């Protein structure tokens, strides 16, 4: 469904991705793990066109999408929920949703409010007035109303309290249950292990490990070697 | 005596609404595109000249009120597509150089087409009379100007605050990258906003024509005032442009009867005070 084929991406002259390949199939939730600076965010930005790869290809549903403008890639259903959520602070919650709304999306405003009752309560509030957890919910909701065919999430639980993290995990489980494929960048291993079908580990701009959730769980050495994070 | 002040305050409000119309376009363009448009005064000038030509050819001011802003907006749209969009990413100094060049070209072409001497535009026939209220008398056209510009202000506010387009413009002034991630063609949004902002300058030029006529040196003067208004009101702020536009208009108009020589000085002094007390302007945000 989404196929990243040996991409090389740069910030100016610094070579950040040195040949990343990965794929996400229909209905899968795949995580992209790795230490800070490994290239996880850059991989997502390369897919959506914010940092166009200089070599390699990104294919979505069989079509090459790299080289296109970000808005054209977004229109084909590749939705990124960016790292710092990208909520418009001067717009109300409802305006944040309405500028993203598309008629053909299976999620319309009413569906979003059913999924996120908290957002309906706060619909007239400005984006600035939301808590971190509410902003994350709004960012995910805004991606859903935008008619996604795949969802890319960049550290959705970063900086959130544990109860809110559980809430986000529940939402992501719902989304996966609906068959929407997800590529998740996440530092919180507990979250990843609850959700993922497969994992990729990035290190210094390269994929250094790739395996199923089962294989990853059964081999703690991988965790220690590549991530050195406590679960 | 009181009537003199009332007269000057009303004059100031009319002038202030013209300042608002030109400044709100400038601030809209700056807010969304982070683009400094030094050609904005020249587009105002073009609006005045197109009004003069339309009125001369057809005798119909109302036609020019419709056509001149459209024509100016169309020209801006073409310029944006061909030139302006290539320099959004450059530092402001480069943008100033390019747009100052455009302003000079428009000004010189205007002199070639309409001559170096200013043209006067007659007040539309319908509004040549005077409104009387007891002992107080006031020209109809000036009242019309205040009312019409207020209607445009309300329409513009509704457009910016109540429509999807307006929400996109406001969102884009926070982060154009995030707007494009939601599938919005950001380039089209830029073109439309630039053309709209410039068309408002053209409209201000038309409305001012029956009062001040059209003359080639109006452009730089009005550009200076527009920047004062935007700085006082706060970059990117609609409310700021309205409040500061009216304030500058009224101050200038009152000073014209109290201390004519100091009338321009006062608005720059007002700007200096505002910058000292509130560096981001009355309604600005950091």
Image (spheres, rainbow, N blue to C red):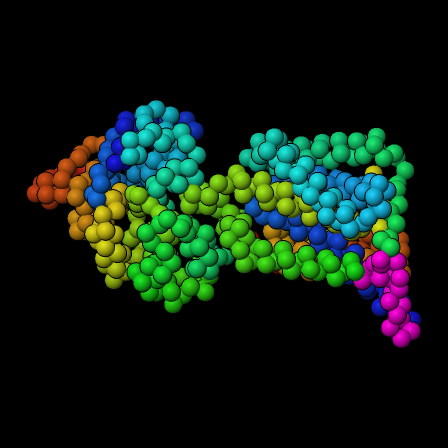
Q: Image quadrant of residue A57? A: top left
Q: Quadrant of the N terminus of chain B?
A: bottom right
Instruction: Count numbered badges in the picture.
Output: 0
Residue B19 belongs to the span the image colors magenta: no
Identify whether B77 is placed above or below B27.
Answer: above
Of residues A95 and B217, the one nearer the viewer is A95
Residue A114 visible to the viewer: yes
Of residues A78 and A153, the one nearer the viewer is A78
Whether residue A163 sits left or right of residue B151 in the image: it is left
Whether residue A183 sits left or right of residue A216 in the image: it is right
Residue at 13%, 40% (x, y): give it: A212
Of residues B13 and B114, the one nearer the viewer is B114
Identify whether B172 is placed above or below A65.
Answer: below
Identify whether A211 is placed above or below B2.
Answer: above
Residue found farthest to the front: B58
Whether residue A153 sits left or right of residue B83 in the image: it is left
Residue A84 visible to the viewer: no
Residue found farthest to the top: A55
Residue at 40%, 65% (x, y): give it: A122
Q: Position of residue B152 (x, y in %)?
A: 68, 56
Tell me where the magenta segment starts and ends, as one range. B126-143
Residue at 51%, 47% (x, y): give it: B172
Residue found farthest to the bottom: B134
Residue at 40%, 49% (x, y): give it: A102
Identify whether B123 is placed above or below B134.
Answer: above
Whether residue A123 sits left or right of residue B81 in the image: it is left
Q: Position of residue A225 (x, y in %)?
A: 16, 37
Q: Position of residue B173 (x, y in %)?
A: 53, 48
Q: Position of residue B62 (x, y in %)?
A: 78, 51
């Amino acid at each position: 469904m989404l196929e990243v084929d040996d991409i090389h991406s740069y910030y100016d002259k610094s070579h950040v991705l040195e040949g990343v390949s990965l794929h996400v199939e229909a209905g899968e939730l795949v995580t992209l793990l790795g230490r800070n600076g490994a290239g996880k965010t850059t991989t997502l930005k390369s897919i959506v066109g914010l940092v166009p790869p200089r070599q390699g290809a990104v294919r979505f549903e069989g079509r090459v999408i790299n080289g296109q403008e970000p808005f054209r890639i977004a229109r084909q259903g590749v939705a990124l929920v960016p790292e710092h959520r990208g909520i418009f602070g001067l717009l109300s919650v409802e305006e944040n949703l309405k500028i993203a709304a598309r008629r053909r999306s299976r999620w319309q405003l009413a569906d979003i409010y059913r999924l996120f009752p908290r957002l309906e309560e706060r619909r007239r509030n400005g984006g600035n007035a939301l808590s971190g957890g509410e902003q994350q919910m709004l960012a995910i909701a805004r991606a859903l109303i935008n008619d996604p065919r795949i969802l890319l999430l960049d550290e959705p639980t970063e900086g959130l309290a544990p109860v809110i993290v559980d809430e986000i995990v529940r939402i992501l489980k719902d989304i996966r249950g609906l068959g929407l494929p997800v590529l998740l960048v996440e530092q919180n291993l507990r979250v990843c292990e609850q959700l993922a079908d497969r994992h990729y580990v990035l290190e210094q701009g390269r994929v250094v490990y790739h395996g199923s959730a089962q294989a990853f769980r059964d081999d703690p050495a991988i965790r220690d070697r590549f991530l050195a994070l406590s679960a | 005596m009181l009537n003199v002040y009332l007269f000057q305050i009303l004059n100031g409000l009319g002038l202030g609404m013209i300042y608002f119309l030109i400044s709100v376009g400038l601030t809209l363009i700056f807010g969304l595109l982070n683009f400094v448009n030094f050609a904005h005064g020249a587009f105002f000038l073009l609006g005045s000249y197109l009004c003069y030509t339309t009125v001369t050819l057809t005798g119909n001011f109302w036609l020019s009120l419709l056509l001149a802003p459209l024509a100016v907006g169309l020209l801006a749209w073409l310029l944006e597509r061909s030139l302006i969009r290539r320099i959004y990413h450059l530092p402001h100094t480069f943008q100033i150089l390019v747009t100052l060049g455009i302003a000079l070209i428009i000004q010189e072409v205007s002199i070639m087409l309409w001559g170096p001497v200013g043209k006067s535009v007659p007040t539309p026939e319908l509004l040549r009379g005077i409104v009387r209220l007891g002992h107080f008398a006031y020209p109809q056209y000036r009242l019309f100007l205040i009312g019409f510009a207020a209607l445009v202000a309300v329409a513009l506010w509704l457009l910016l605050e109540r429509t999807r387009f307006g929400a996109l413009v406001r969102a884009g002034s926070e982060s154009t990258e995030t707007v494009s991630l939601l599938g919005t063609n950001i380039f089209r949004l830029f073109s439309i906003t630039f053309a709209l902002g410039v068309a408002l300058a053209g409209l201000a030029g038309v409305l001012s024509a029956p009062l001040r006529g059209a003359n080639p040196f109006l452009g730089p003067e009005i550009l200076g005032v527009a920047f004062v208004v935007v700085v006082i009101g706060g970059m990117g702020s609609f409310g700021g442009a309205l409040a500061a536009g009216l304030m500058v208009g009224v101050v200038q108009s009152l000073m014209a009867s109290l201390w004519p020589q100091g009338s321009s000085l006062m608005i720059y002094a007002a700007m200096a005070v505002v910058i000292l007390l509130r560096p981001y302007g009355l309604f600005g945000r950091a």
